[in-house]
Structures are given as structure tokens and as C-alpha cells.
Image (cartoon, rainbow, N blue to C red):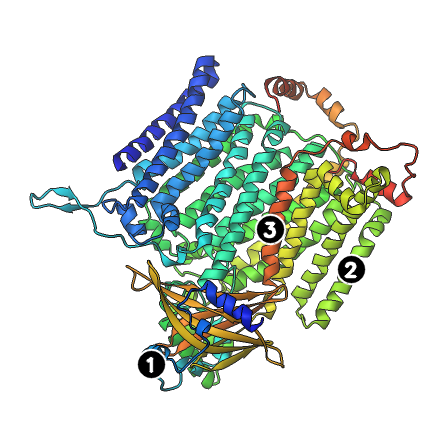
């Protein structure tokens, strides 16, 4: 199976090269058969990559310990579930997995557009094949997952060698979320290849800027959605497994996943400028180029370890390849832009600084500044070592100080932007739109201040969250009231109908609502508390309203690990009401003496999480050490993530036709809409 | 949560769980296990590190090169002990000693930087090359802001005649390209 897989990977490379070279020839000659054959070569490359991936999985499932990659990342007792995930637990497999996910996108595009856009598709095919060639080069010649173990035999030659068992999977990765987090994040990274390919293809084919945006709208949203899910799951995994009490540490790998998400989010917004007003065409092209490059850079930072140690850069084989690919892509993008920039001319004007257009510009400014700040902060240790020979650390305190104001400014625009009219917003409409939200934000702050949340940035955050929340509620209410007046449906049904009629706009609001929830959760950070205590049996520790008593402990022997489990009773309040039992664990995995995994026990409520870690035995006393955290409002973050995904799914749905709903309604009995409603209806015109 | 629900929880974890038989610390099994696990003596050195040392330790990097966390917040994920690793503990003790000598937070940070180099401080220093890291986000923002203001002014000054229709009428090449795109693609 290893030879089979290895060979299909090589064939995939050949097919991709043919799709690339043949594609260029097809563009030049416009020969229909050549166009068809290059498209089919592109599809074949994808299928061959699937076969190679299935081969690797087969080697894992059959415990083939003659394969170096299987030995490093699996063992006999590893459960089936994690054998699937073992594919992306190391360098070679991760890069193959990247190719696989990219192939799913490429195959979908090639099949979906096989009879459409005949002139543009050869260009798209060439760009996609180019990206595929890069990853297949890595898969085949740099980080091949099909390497076999060998030893020097009696004859003095290398002979194949099979180990009895493997080293096992890294314990930190033996958690259900690790099975779904990387596929999501990688689907996000790879997914941005599609809008990139269409943007570059449209530029090369000299299409005016709006065409590719129209074609790739859904693809971009899908990629963005996967990226968001991936980031959320990564944060949740860090929270539930790593046992340090937090979910985001501004670690280089986390930052790497955030970078394309920030530019991708900026892109999703500025696309609307182009669709509605024919502006920012050059900007959008570059934004999607940058997002793609950041995806590649993110993969590079994640895989090469360049940031955590500058020396790994020299040792890592993939570094120069990635840098080379990024530079080539940048060069191709720049040259195509310079040659064909005339086709990206902007057409419109605006009248005021206070308008939807300028709010989009500020939105993009903030996302881009956030992105560059995270990028330069992440790379700064490397730069400092290059320039001064001293490595300067850039840790969480730096990112928090820089990103909190930017994040709050973005949150502010989330509320303000959608309510500003295109071109020019009158003072009157501002008063109408923002009066109530300001009051609600202020009331929220009074509530949170009284509840003990007394921290300036948190209070600003709560204020903005409720401000934005109320603007969203008002938008739904106004629209629903208009529909309700016309159709006689109740407000809830009308709101549903409203969302279905303009899914992108109201899906967008739902996403904004999710972001508000995430910000509420983040605003709880300054109020985190923790206690670490070496505990004897029967000992208690107090944390906030909770009293934790270590009752007993036991040992669980599972197939692949042995767990020590602490049994902790949680009492709440002055009356010591019995709340629940918590069972934090420490797992010692087979085959790896040094590494252990924690299973954090979390009692999560909307108000706060009680987060209990069994840290292990105190090395001096052998008593168990319990580390308990009280993290307010964390649950809101995960809820927010769910809303973001639901909003994106709503935005991906096609709009329901208005005529169908209005068909059955009596026309005479419709009351004239109130003046405020007319205004809001007008406001919505031209909105997305 | 009531007693019954605790039992339900217990069952999820399988029959080996002692709660199901009631919590009995006198059970020989439990006693034998505990005797093995927890020889009782001494006061933990973890407790010896003051809360203040942990606070100051939030600004100093754990130098174990394995966890990329602070000395005060080291949880050493994946290690045998999910808490301060040996490096972090040594550093915390060192901080405690320095605190006992009456050193301020800044003096302690300086002492660590002198010992390990600039890498020991988790933030870039606000002088020398480190200052660049702090200034850059503001520079990006100001440059970006200037650009946005410039663009908005440019757009605002654009003559009203430059509506979409008029603009394309003036630009034959763009018009042709648009027509071609419309011909060659479908949505």
C-alpha cells in the first residue's frame, strides 16, 4: 500500500504539472480538446491525492510499523478514532492533508463550472494547478509521508525494518476536538485558494473586477466559516485540554490562524462596497491576494516552527520552499496587477465622511491594522534576532495592550456601520438610529458595574456589546414590523420571513450578534481568579462562591492510557449547597513516559466557569495539586461561535422571493406604514 | 444537584467509581491506594512561592524552552505536572528572594534580563529596538488613517458626472471587457 500511495502521489504531481503547462498552452491556443484534457488532468490529480491519503490512513489502520510516519504518530492501542486524526498530527501528513482538502475544493470547482465560464476556467485551472504543484512538490520530494524504516543489514546495505509498535500519538492531540479542529482550520486555509484563483484568473483574463467577486462570493463565505469554526475549536481545545485556564495565549500558531481570518473578514465587508457601489476593486483584489498569502504564511508558521525558535528555521526543510512560493506568488500577482490594472477602475463617488462607504473603509483599516499588528508582533522575535542578535519576546501582554483598543473600535463599527446610509447620513437619522442603543449600552454598564465588573476596558466592551446588540434588534424589529403590517403575520414570523428574504444581510446581522457574544465572553478576562493548592484528602479550597473538597481519588486503566482521577465535591454559597462532583484527570499514555494529558473538569454556567485541573503530584510531598480557576462569562464565547456559524449558513442560503409571500395578501387592508418605517424601508434600499 | 444526580454522574464513569458504593474513606482498597499515592509529610514548596512572586512572574518568561509561557503562569501543557515546571519554580523562588531583598518589579525584571537576555521579559522593552514593536501598530494606524481620509476626500471630490453609466461610456476598453465577461461567463 505504501508503494501504491507513493506512486499515486507522484502521478498526482505529474497530472498537476500537465494541468499547469497544458493549461497555459490551452489559453494560448484555445484548442477545445486541450482545454478539456487539462481540466481532466486537474481532476485526476485531485483523485490521485485522495488515493494517496486513503493509503496513509490504510497504513495507520493496519498498524504498518515499517512506515516511519506511522511509527512516529500511532501505536497498536490507539483507538480507531484517533488513527484517522494521526494523519495530520505530524509534518508530512499535515502537508498531505492540506493537499487533500485543497483537492476537494478544486474538484468541486472544476466539476461545478465544467460547462460554465468557458473562457475564464482555463485561467482558474492554471492558478489552481500552480498551487497544487507547490504542495505536491512538498508531498513528494520534501516531506514524503511514505518513507519506510530501514536499518543497516548484515550485508552492509540498508534493509527494510519493521518495529513491533509505534511511539503513539501525542497525548495533547488525543482529544475529540483535535479530530475536527485541524480539518476545519485547514479547510479555511485551503478554501481561500478558490477566491484567490478566480481573482488572479479574472485579472489575467482582463475581466472587470466585479466578475470574480460575483462568482466566488459563496466560496469565500464557506472558507471564512471553516476558518472561524477552526479558530473557535482551537481555542476551545486549548481551554479544555491544555489546562492553563485560558483559551487564547497569542501563541504564534494561534496568531497564524487569526491573520487570514482578519483579512478575510475585511474582504467579506469590502466586497459589498464593490457590489453596491463599484468601488474598491483594486483593494479587493489585493485583499484576496493577501488573504491567500497569509494562509500560506500561516501554514508555514504552523508547520515550520520558525517563530518559536529561529534555529528551527535553519533546520526545517520546508522553510525555503514556503518563502520561495510566497515570493513567486507575490511576483505573479504584482506583475498581473501592473499589466491589467486598467480593468479595475473604480466608478463612484461619495458625499460625506459619515457614510456607509467610509465606514467600510474604516472597517478595513481596523482589520488590516489588527492583522499587521498581530503579524509584526508574531514575527518580531525573529526580526529582533536578525537585526540585533538579541531575541526579544513578544508575549500575551503586548498583544492584549495593542489588540484590545483595536478590537473595541471594530466592535463599535459593527454597531455603527450597518446603520449608516450609503453616500451620506443625516444627523436626524443618526439620532433615530443610535438613541436607544446608546441608552441600552449605558444601562448594561450600570448593571455590570453593580454586579462587580469594575474594569474600564471591560465596561467599554459591555457598553459596545449592548449598543451593537440593540442596533441589531432594532434592525430586525423595523423590518419585521413592515412585513407584519403587510402580511398580517406576527412579529416573530415576520422577522423570520425578513431574514429569509435577504439572507446575506440578516445572516450578517446574526454573525454580528455572535461576535457580540464572543466579546461579552472576552470582557470577563480581567475578572479571572485562580487558586493552586496541594491538597490532602478531605482538604478544601475556596474560590469565589465555591468550596471544593477533595473527597477521594482513583485510577482508571484504559487501553491506551492510565488515568489518575481526583474526585472533588463542589459546594456553593454560604449555606454550602451541594452543587456537583468534578473529576479532573491526569492521563499517562503508553509509549511516552514524559508526556501526559490533562482532562480538565469544567462546571460551566452563563455566569462563570469553575475550571478544575488536577496538575499532578507535588514532586516533594507526592500530594495531589489542584489548580482551580474561576473564569467569568467564558461560555458566551462558545455560544457566540455557534451564532457566527448559524449566521454564515443563513447568509449562504438563497433569498426567498418576496412575490410568493405577498401573493396571498389583501391589498386594500394594508395600513399605510408609519413615517419611521418608511424611513427604515428607504434606508434598507441599496443595503445589502 | 441532588444526591441522586451525583449517582447518575457516577454511573457514567463506570462501576469502578467509589461514589456508587458511597464515599468510604475506610475502604481498604482506597486506603491502600492512598497510602501508595500520598505519603504525608512536609509543606509544599509551591505554597512557599508568594502570590506576589506569581504576579511579578507573569512578566517574566519561563526559560524551560518547552512551554513558551510565563514563569508565573507556567502550566507546562503536556508535561508530567500541569503546573510550574522546574525552570518556572526556580525562577519564582528567585523572584521571591529578590522581593525579600526589597527589589521592585522593574528591578526584578532587569535582573532577569541581565541574566538571560532580552528574551526573559515577555514584552518588548520600551527602549532600543524593542520600542519599534510598540510604535509600529500606531504607525500602521496613522498611515492607514491618512490613506482612508485621502481616499474619501478623493472620492468626494470626484465629479458627479462620473456615475457608473457615464464612466463606462468614457472608457471603451472597460466597456468592451465588461461585455466580453458577460458573454463568456454565466452565474
Which label lies toward us, 2 or 3?
3
State the residue in front, A116 or A281: A116
Q: Is residue A477 left or right of residue A532?
A: right
Distance of label 1 from label 3 (alpha carbons): 46 Å
How many C-alpha atoms fall within 10 Å of the one at disc 2: few (<14), some, or many (≥20)? many
Is residue A336 depicted above or below A138 in this figure? Answer: above
> Where is residue A212, by image quadrant?
top right
| Residue that carries the numbered disc 1 in the rendered image | B35
Quadrant, the C terminus of chain A: top right
Q: Secondary structure at mark 3?
A: helix
Q: Are marks 1 and 3 in contact (CB under 8 Å)?
A: no
Q: Secondary structure at mark 2?
A: helix
Distance of label 1 from label 2 (alpha carbons): 59 Å
| Residue that carries the numbered disc 3 in the rendered image | A642
Is residue A187 depicted above or below B11 in this figure? Answer: above
| Residue that carries the numbered disc 2 in the rendered image | A440
Is residue A469 depicted above or below B39 in this figure? Answer: above
Q: Secondary structure at mark 1?
A: helix
Say which label, 2 or 3, has the lower sequence index. 2
Q: Is residue A681 left or right of residue A158?
A: right
Amino acid at each position: 500500500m505504501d508503494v501504491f500511495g507513493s506512486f499515486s502521489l507522484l502521478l498526482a504531481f505529474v497530472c498537476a504539472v500537465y494541468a499547469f503547462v497544458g493549461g497555459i498552452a490551452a489559453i494560448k491556443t484555445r484548442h477545445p480538446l486541450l482545454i478539456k484534457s487539462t481540466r481532466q488532468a486537474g481532476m485526476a490529480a485531485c483523485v490521485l491525492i485522495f488515493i494517496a491519503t486513503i493509503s496513509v490512513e490504510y497504513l495507520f489502520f493496519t498498524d504498518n510499523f515499517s512506515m516511519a510516519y506511522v511509527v512516529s504518530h500511532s501505536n497498536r492501542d490507539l483507538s480507531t478514532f484517533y488513527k484517522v486524526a494521526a494523519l495530520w498530527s505530524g509534518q508530512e501528513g499535515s502537508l498531505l492533508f492540506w493537499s487533500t482538502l485543497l483537492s476537494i475544493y478544486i474538484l468541486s470547482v472544476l466539476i461545478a463550472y465544467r460547462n460554465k465560464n468557458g473562457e475564464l476556467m482555463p485561467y482558474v485551472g492554471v492558478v489552481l494547478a500552480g498551487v497544487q504543484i507547490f504542495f505536491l512538490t512538498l508531498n513528494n520530494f520534501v516531506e514524503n509521508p511514505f518513507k519506510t524504516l530501514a536499518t543497516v543489514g548484515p550485508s552492509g546495505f540498508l534493509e527494510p525494518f519493521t518495529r513491533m509498535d509505534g511511539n503513539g500519538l501525542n497525548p495533547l492531540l488525543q482529544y475529540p476536538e483535535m479530530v475536527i479542529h485541524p480539518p476545519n482550520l485547514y479547510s479555511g486555509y485551503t478554501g481561500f485558494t478558490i477566491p484567490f484563483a478566480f481573482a488572479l484568473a479574472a485579472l489575467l483574463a482582463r475581466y472587470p473586477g466585479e466578475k470574480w467577486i460575483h462568482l466566488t462570493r459563496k466560496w469565500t463565505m464557506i472558507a471564512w466559516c471553516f476558518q472561524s469554526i477552526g479558530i473557535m475549536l482551537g481555542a476551545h481545545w486549548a481551554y479544555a485540554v491544555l489546562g492553563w485556564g485560558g483559551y487564547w495565549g497569542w501563541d504564534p500558531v494561534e496568531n497564524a490562524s487569526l491573520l487570514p481570518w482578519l483579512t478575510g473578514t475585511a474582504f467579506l465587508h469590502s466586497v459589498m462596497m464593490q457590489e453596491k457601489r463599484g468601488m474598491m476593486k483594486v483593494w479587493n483584489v489585493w485583499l484576496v491576494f493577501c488573504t491567500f498569502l497569509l494562509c500560506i504564511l500561516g501554514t508555514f508558521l504552523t508547520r515550520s516552527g520558525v517563530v518559536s525558535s529561529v534555529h528551527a528555521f535553519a533546520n526545517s526543510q520546508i522553510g525555503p520552499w514556503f518563502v520561495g512560493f510566497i515570493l513567486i506568488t507575490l511576483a505573479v500577482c504584482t506583475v498581473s496587477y501592473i499589466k491589467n490594472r486598467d480593468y479595475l477602475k473604480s466608478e463612484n463617488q461619495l458625499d460625506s465622511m459619515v457614510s456607509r462607504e467610509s465606514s467600510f473603509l474604516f472597517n478595513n483599516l481596523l482589520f488590516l491594522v489588527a492583522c499587521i499588528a498581530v503579524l509584526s508582533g508574531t514575527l518580531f522575535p525573529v526580526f529582533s534576532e536578525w537585526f540585533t542578535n538579541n531575541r526579544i519576546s513578544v508575549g500575551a501582554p503586548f498583544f492584549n495592550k495593542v489588540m484590545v483598543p483595536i478590537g473595541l473600535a471594530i466592535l463599535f463599527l459593527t454597531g455603527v456601520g450597518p446603520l449608516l446610509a450609503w453616500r451620506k447620513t443625516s444627523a436626524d437619522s443618526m439620532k433615530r438610529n443610535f438613541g436607544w442603543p446608546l441608552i441600552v449600552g449605558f444601562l448594561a454598564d450600570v448593571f455590570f458595574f453593580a454586579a462587580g465588573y469594575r474594569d474600564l476596558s471591560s465596561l467599554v466592551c459591555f457598553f459596545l456589546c449592548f449598543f451593537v446588540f440593540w442596533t441589531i434588534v432594532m434592525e430586525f424589529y423595523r423590518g419585521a414590523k413592515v412585513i407584519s403590517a403587510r402580511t398580517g403575520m406576527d412579529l416573530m414570523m415576520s422577522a423570520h420571513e425578513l431574514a429569509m428574504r435577504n439572507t446575506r444581510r440578516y445572516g450578517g446581522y446574526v454573525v454580528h450578534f455572535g461576535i457580540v457574544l464572543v466579546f461579552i465572553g472576552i470582557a470577563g478576562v480581567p475578572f479571572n481568579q485562580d487558586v493552586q493548592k496541594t491538597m490532602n484528602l478531605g482538604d478544601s479550597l475556596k474560590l469565589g462562591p465555591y468550596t471544593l473538597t477533595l473527597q477521594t481519588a482513583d485510577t482508571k486503566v484504559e487501553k491506551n492510557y492510565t488515568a489518575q482521577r481526583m474526585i472533588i465535591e463542589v459546594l456553593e454559597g454560604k449555606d454550602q449547597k451541594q452543587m456537583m462532583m468534578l473529576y479532573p484527570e491526569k492521563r499517562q499514555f503508553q509509549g511516552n513516559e514524559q508526556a501526559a494529558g490533562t482532562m480538565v473538569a469544567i462546571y460551566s454556567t452563563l455566569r462563570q466557569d469553575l475550571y478544575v485541573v488536577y496538575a499532578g503530584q507535588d514532586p516533594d510531598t507526592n500530594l495531589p495539586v489542584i489548580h482551580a480557576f474561576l473564569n467569568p462569562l467564558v461560555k458566551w464565547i462558545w455560544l457566540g461561535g455557534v451564532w457566527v456559524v448559524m449566521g454564515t449558513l443563513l447568509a449562504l442560503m438563497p433569498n426567498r422571493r418576496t412575490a410568493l409571500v405577498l401573493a396571498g395578501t389583501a391589498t386594500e387592508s394594508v395600513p399605510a406604514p408609519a413615517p419611521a418605517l418608511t424611513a427604515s424601508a428607504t434606508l434598507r434600499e441599496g443595503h445589502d | 444537584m441532588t444526591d441522586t444526580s451525583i449517582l447518575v454522574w457516577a454511573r457514567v464513569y463506570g462501576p469502578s467509581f467509589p461514589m456508587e458504593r458511597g464515599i468510604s474513606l475506610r475502604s481498604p482498597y482506597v486506603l491502600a491506594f492512598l497510602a501508595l499515592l500520598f505519603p504525608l509529610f512536609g509543606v509544599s514548596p509551591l505554597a512557599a512561592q508568594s502570590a506576589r512572586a506569581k504576579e511579578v512572574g507573569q512578566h517574566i518568561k519561563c526559560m524551560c524552552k518547552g512551554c513558551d509561557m510565563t514563569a508565573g503562569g507556567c502550566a507546562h501543557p503536556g508535561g508530567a505536572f500541569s503546573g510550574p515546571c522546574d525552570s518556572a519554580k526556580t525562577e519564582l523562588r528567585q523572584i521571591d528572594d529578590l522581593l525579600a531583598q526589597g527589589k521592585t518589579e522593574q528591578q526584578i525584571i532587569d535582573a532577569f534580563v541581565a541574566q538571560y537576555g532580552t528574551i526573559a521579559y515577555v514584552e518588548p522593552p520600551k527602549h532600543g529596538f524593542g520600542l519599534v514593536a510598540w510604535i509600529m501598530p500606531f504607525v500602521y494606524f496613522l498611515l492607514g488613517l491618512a490613506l482612508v481620509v485621502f481616499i474619501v476626500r478623493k472620492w468626494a471630490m470626484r465629479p458627479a458626472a462620473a456615475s457608473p453609466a457615464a464612466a463606462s461610456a468614457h472608457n471603451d476598453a472597460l466597456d468592451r471587457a465588461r461585455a466580453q465577461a458577460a458573454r463568456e461567463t454565466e452565474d
